Amino acid sequence: MTETTAHLVDPRELISPEIREKISTTVRAQHPQITEDRADAGIGQMAAFLTACATSDRPLSPSPEVDDYWHAFLMHTEDYDTWCADRFGKKVHHKPGYLDPEEHGGGKMLRQYAVDTITELGFLVDPDFWPEIELAECSQCHANCSDSPLTPES
């Protein structure tokens, strides 16, 4: 019997190193405490989120930190527009605003939808960038959880 493991894609692969460097420089100029490694990981989570937005038929919401990376990418308008056009054939518009919690479930639910969609698309989800989501209680055994309350202690 052969065991198969789902191949999860590192979402940083969605954006070229040159564009990642521009976004990283912008984010780190605004938030000097962010390391290069953290910025690179955040850019990946933002790229996965944008891919989820482009493919979802429901509204999604980024975490506040992922939104910071999106804002930094938007500051490089030509790169952002070209990336969206090449990847999705359309622009993913940033539309901040209020969505009725009765209709959409509220911000936390919209972020959970985002994480679920990112996971369904096969991208790695970094729980550090989605702090209010209870990732340890998810049903995805491949979510790289190490502190799940459901895992017995060794």
Image: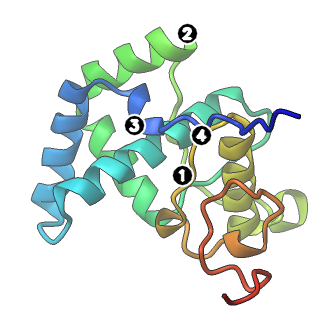
Discs 3, 4 touching: Cβ within 8 Å: no
**Residue 123, numbered circle:** 4
Is residue 81 placed above or below 116 in the rendered structure?
above
Q: Which of marks 4 and 1 is nearer the N terminus?
A: 1
* Frontmost residue, 10 versus 86: 10
Q: Residue 84: where, in percent of width, then height?
A: 46, 20
What type is the residue that disc 3 sits on? Arg
* Left or right for 9, reference 120: left
Is residue 82 placed above or below 145 in the rendered structure?
above
Residue at numbered disc 2: 89
Q: Which of marks 2 and 3 is nearer the N terminus?
A: 3
Assign a secondary structure to mark 2.
Answer: loop
| Image point (34%, 25%), residue name | 80
Discs 2, 3 touching: Cβ within 8 Å: no
Mark-to-mark CA distance, 1 and 3 = 24 Å
Q: Residues within 10 Å of mark 1 (few under 14, many from 20)?
A: few
Q: Residue 8: where, in percent of width, then height?
A: 60, 38
